[in-house]
Image (cartoon, grey):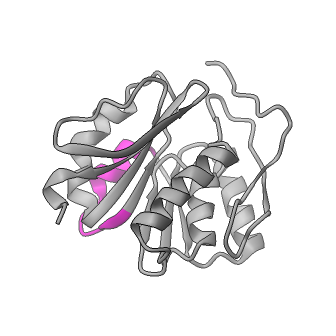
Amino acid sequence: MKKTNTGNKPIRIVAGQYRRTPIAVPDVPGLRPTPDRVRETLFNWLTHLWDGNYTDKRVLDLFAGSGALGFEAASRGATQVQMVENDRSAIASLRTLRDKLKADAVRIHAGEALAVVQRMDASRFDLILLDPPFNQDWLTRLWPLLPAILADEALIYAESEAPLAPPPEFEILRQDQAGAVHYGLLQFAAMRK
């Protein structure tokens, strides 16, 4: 598997209480942190849709990696950010940054994404962040499981190596492309009010 190179350019939290905090990118095969510009676009979309209010939002970052997406949500005031990661070195980096920031809203769960979602029972999230390793068909396997863990009016952010092609019950609200990365914000149509 090809390793992604960030070009030795540090990534940083874009906004909120942890703004400008550098994020270490562990040397993990397939890890490609969401670039600052893409995160800024995503959180601009969310700020618009949520009227700038993150304080009652519960977030699941299902492929945490460097933690860029999850820490961005925590920085902006999300009540809870559950990060899921399978790689030991990435988990260590996530815990180090969480402890450094004293980010009490951030919880880190060691485990494989599909298994974690299948074990969730009463958990409901307002935002699910899906930034899986490319070319492993993760989104196709996850779409059917997501409705069971979505709160009312929940949003799903997804990144893919190809244009997003969710099942028809998911509506794409916004989408864009940055280089080889296709990304978008979706909603499960049955939960739309």
170 relative to 12, above or below? above
124 relative to 183, above or below? below
- The N terminus lies in which quarter of the figure? top right
Which portion, as a residue range, is magenta?
112-126
Left or right placement of residue 152 versus residue 37 in this view: left
- The C terminus lies in which quarter of the figure? bottom left
Give the image location of residue 172, x and y in percent: 31, 43
Give 112 or 182, whichever is nearer the viewer: 182
Give the residue at x 54% y 59%: 44
Give the image location of residue 112, x and y in percent: 44, 44
Give the image location of residue 120, x and y in percent: 29, 60
Give the image location of residue 169, x and y in percent: 16, 43
Give the residue at x 33% y 51%: 117
Left or right placement of residue 104 versus residue 176 in this view: right
46 relative to 139, above or below? below
Say which quarter of the image contains residue 108.
Answer: bottom right
Give the residue at x 46% y 65%: 48
Q: How many numbered discs?
A: 0
**What residue occupies the far right of the structure in this picture?**
8
Give 68 or 88, whichever is nearer the viewer: 68
Q: Note whether residue 109 is visible.
A: no
Give the residue at x 79% y 63%: 21
Say which quarter of the image contains residue 5.
Answer: top right
174 relative to 15, above or below? above
Q: Note whether residue 135 is visible.
A: yes
Does the segment drawn in magenta span residue 136? Answer: no
